[in-house]
């Protein structure tokens, strides 16, 4: 691929080269991520990525919807049977510095109600850079092995796992169900030897040990896996008939006794300072371990406390991965672009001369907002010693894990003499509407609403995102294509797409990139999503401040679209009983409530939502299994100090039993749980003649 100097490229030549680069890099991604068999060297891949970014910077209007700059990975491979995990395989939250580790310890102590001097032990173990695997044993025999997949469903690789020497086929003394989890990896020496054999035999070589391990485990022919030097570290578990032990360290020892390889660097630590000291020891020995690691994992040692802490939606509260430090690099800031999001936020993005940071070529970095560019925080205090950021500056870029790259510093000694302070736009670059920054808000927002094409497109992209409607075949690229062609302007248009064109199937199948089969699949996928859970629908509406967790909270509280819709209409004046009831929901504050009610009752927005819902079958929210619950359907208020559990635990327990937890007492409250120092809430409850329980009475009622 000829690298014509950028200043000599014509617009047509640039467009053609971007198309060619997109195809080449997409094929490389497919080979690397899906087939675990890269066909392009890292150096060549990086060169093409840098070339692509440089052309996009030179010709920003030509950036493609499928730009390689915006692509991460590729679609999963087909060919394996799917396995539904009986206990989800979750990912871990990340820490990047000592402050994050201290915050992790503080958050656990707050949740458990522990003071700073109360004993709390952790384990610390290397974070293996490999492929997660779950092994299911029944009565001591290995019956199933599955990859993590999306956490809920993975690939059945049982035949392949049986070929790995570190994985026992039988467990002496194990009965019933025992599900062991860990990481499949390849040592540095075995990786080098494998690539030598591959080269000698005329086969494909692997880019790194992680990809070699993943590609070897996911071979459709288990005979090929048998020839690959795979290893396995056990460190966790899923479904168990009975507990392995009382602590994490004891459980690891039990896994070792059962015949699994466990990491000898796992240590027991009694404070954040001990965690950080062990982290430093592991980091110092990283180069000599003989296998790849990318951090250290900390876990609460007491398994009973792990059970109390439980899980967030995608991560456990009792564990965190302390990643190794972000890598830094200096490069030139070539431009500052303004992007408009679905809520109208004007987000500045740094366009950089491409530079490799942490093994990844970085050409863009976030600049947060206008204050950040000016060298101050939202309160006006100086950041970066007050140094502002200007086009032409030499800037220090850092990237930690999968976090979006950021600018850490500016080298004023290299600032061009003609560099000018950046003037943040006062109007929307997409539609020209005023860009307003409300008092107390760090972000300037376009006031154009639905007339702003950028907001409309971003709202549609959000609508079809994974946590929202997740329509197969209708992603960000297709949304942009259909919007630009006038086929889709609002969510309801998706569900009328086929009917609005009598020859909809034929018309779509004749488009570039579509065929009759893919068009038919799209319309079928759209029809499948006409039935949608209430929480997903609320999230899909893209209302500011209403994220996935808040959407599910609202769905559980109101139960049905009819009830939710009616409550929002009644709450529209932002006062009265319906408004107070909304604020009474534990976890809903005035800002969220105001955004929700305002959006649901704007005339244009309201009409758009009504047109959408007319095409949907909105499923009522799932209710907890509460057949034996004494508090199902009741509204509970916790007040005062709880001595045997924290407020967060009490709330989670009540909701799991079907109760609604409110933050204020009213005539609709059923039970008030009052601890020491309850004050006015307890008095109001007694004045209203409500049921008031102390903590012991509450625990007796719920059977704990």
Image (cartoon, helix red, strand yellow):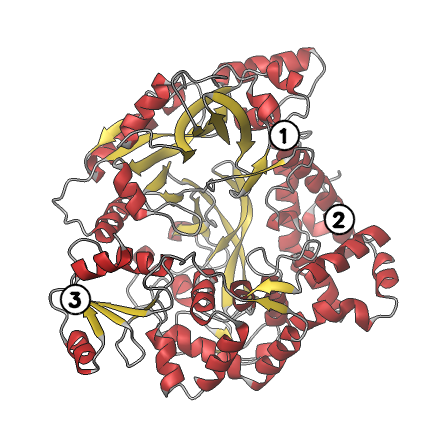
Q: What residue is drawn where x is 49% and y is 21%?
A: 141
Numbered badge on residue 640: 3
Question: How far is disc 3 from disc 2 in space, using C-alphas?
Answer: 63 Å
- Which quadrant: the N terminus? top right
Numbered badge on residue 200: none
Q: Earlier in the sequence, mark 1 or mark 2?
A: 2
State the image coordinates of residue 25 (x, y, percent, origin top left): 68, 40
- Note whether 666 is above or below 159 in the view shown: below
State the image coordinates of residue 44 (x, y, percent, origin top left): 65, 33
Q: Earlier in the sequence, mark 1 or mark 3?
A: 1
Q: What residue is drawn where x is 46% and y is 54%?
A: 393
Nearer to us of marks 3 and 2 is 3
Instruction: From the image, tell me which residue sits under label 2.
Output: 19
Question: How far is disc 1 from disc 2 in space, using C-alphas?
Answer: 24 Å
Q: Secondary structure at mark 2?
A: helix
Nearer to us of marks 1 and 2 is 1
212 sits to left or right of 411: right
Determine whether label 1 and label 2 are within 8 Å by CB: no
In-front residue for pair 595/176: 176
Q: What residue is drawn where x is 58% and y is 55%?
A: 466
Work out whether residue 490 can be spotted: no
Numbered badge on residue 36: 1
- Note whether 504 is above or below 598 in the view shown: above
In-front residue for pair 704/611: 704
Label 3: few (<14), some or many (≥20) within 10 Å?
some
Q: Earlier in the sequence, mark 3 or mark 2?
A: 2
Label 2: few (<14), some or many (≥20) within 10 Å?
some
Q: What residue is drawn where x is 22% and y is 72%?
A: 691
In-front residue for pair 358/418: 358
Label 1: few (<14), some or many (≥20) within 10 Å?
many
């Amino acid at each position: 691929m000829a690298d014509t100097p950028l200043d000599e490229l014509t617009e047509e030549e640039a467009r053609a080269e971007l198309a060619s680069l997109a195809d080449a890099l997409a094929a490389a991604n497919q080979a690397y991520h899906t087939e675990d068999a890269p066909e392009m060297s890292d150096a060549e891949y990086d060169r093409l990525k840098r070339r692509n970014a440089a052309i996009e910077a030179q010709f920003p209007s030509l950036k493609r919807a499928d730009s390689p700059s915006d692509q991460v990975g590729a679609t999963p491979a087909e060919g394996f049977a799917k396995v539904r995990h009986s206990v989800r395989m979750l990912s871990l939250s990340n820490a990047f510095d000592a402050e994050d580790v201290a915050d992790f310890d503080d958050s656990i102590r707050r949740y458990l109600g522990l003071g700073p001097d109360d004993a709390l032990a952790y384990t610390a173990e290397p974070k293996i850079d490999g492929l997660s695997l779950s092994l299911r044993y029944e009565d001591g025999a290995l019956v199933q092995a599955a990859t993590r997949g999306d956490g809920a469903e993975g690939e059945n690789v049982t035949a392949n796992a049986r070929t790995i020497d570190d994985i026992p086929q039988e467990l002496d003394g194990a009965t019933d169900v025992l599900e062991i989890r860990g990481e499949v990896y390849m040592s540095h020496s075995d990786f080098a030897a494998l690539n030598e054999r591959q080269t000698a035999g005329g086969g494909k070589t692997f880019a790194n040990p992680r990809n070699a391990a993943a590609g070897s485990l996911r071979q459709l022919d288990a005979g090929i896996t048998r020839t690959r030097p795979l290893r396995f570290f056990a460190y966790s578990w899923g479904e168990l008939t009975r507990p392995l032990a009382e602590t994490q360290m004891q459980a690891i020892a039990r896994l070792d006794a059962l015949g699994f390889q466990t990491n000898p660097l796992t240590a027991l630590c009694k404070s954040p300072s001990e965690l950080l000291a062990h982290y430093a020891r592991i980091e110092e020995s990283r180069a000599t371990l003989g296998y790849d690691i990318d951090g250290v994992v900390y876990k609460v040692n007491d398994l009973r406390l792990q059970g109390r802490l439980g899980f967030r939606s995608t991560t456990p509260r009792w564990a965190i991965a302390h990643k190794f430090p972000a890598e830094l690099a200096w490069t030139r800031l070539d431009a500052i672009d303004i992007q408009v999001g679905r809520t109208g936020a004007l987000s500045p993005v740094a366009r950089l001369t491409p530079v490799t940071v942490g093994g990844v070529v970085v050409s863009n970095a976030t600049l947060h907002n206008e204050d950040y560019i000016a060298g101050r925080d939202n309160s006006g205090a100086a950041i970066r010693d007050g140094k502002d950021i200007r086009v032409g500056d030499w800037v220090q870029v850092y990237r930690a894990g999968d976090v979006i790259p950021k600018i850490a510093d500016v080298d004023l000694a290299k600032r061009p003499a003609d560099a000018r302070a950046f003037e943040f736009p006062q109007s929307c670059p997409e539609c020209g509407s005023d860009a307003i920054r409300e008092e107390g808000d760090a972000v300037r927002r376009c006031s154009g609403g639905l007339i702003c094409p950028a907001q409309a497109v971003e709202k549609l992209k959000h609508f079809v995102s994974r946590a929202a409607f997740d329509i197969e075949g209708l992603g960000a690229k297709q949304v942009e294509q259909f919007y630009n062609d006038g086929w889709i302007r609002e969510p309801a248009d998706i569900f009328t797409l086929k009917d609005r064109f009598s020859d909809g199937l034929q018309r779509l199948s004749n488009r570039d990139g579509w065929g009759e089969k893919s068009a038919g699949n799209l319309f079928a996928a759209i029809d499948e999503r006409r039935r949608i859970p209430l929480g997903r629908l609320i999230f899909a509406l893209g209302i500011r401040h209403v994220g996935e967790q808040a959407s599910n909270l609202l769905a559980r509280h109101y139960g049905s679209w009819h009830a939710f819709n009616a409550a929002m209409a009644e709450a529209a004046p932002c006062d009265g009983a319906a408004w107070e009831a909304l604020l009474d929901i534990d976890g809903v504050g005035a800002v969220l409530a105001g955004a929700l009610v305002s959006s649901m009752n704007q005339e244009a927005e309201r009409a758009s939502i009504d047109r959408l819902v007319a095409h949907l079958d909105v499923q009522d929210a799932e209710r907890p299994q509460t057949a034996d619950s004494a508090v199902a359907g009741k509204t509970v208020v916790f007040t005062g100090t709880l001595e045997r559990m924290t407020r967060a635990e009490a709330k989670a327990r009540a909701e799991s039993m079907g109760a609604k937890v409110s933050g204020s007492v009213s005539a609709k409250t059923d039970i008030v749980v009052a601890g020491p120092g309850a004050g006015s809430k307890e008095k109001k409850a007694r004045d209203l003649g409500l049921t008031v329980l102390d903590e012991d009475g509450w625990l007796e009622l719920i059977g704990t």
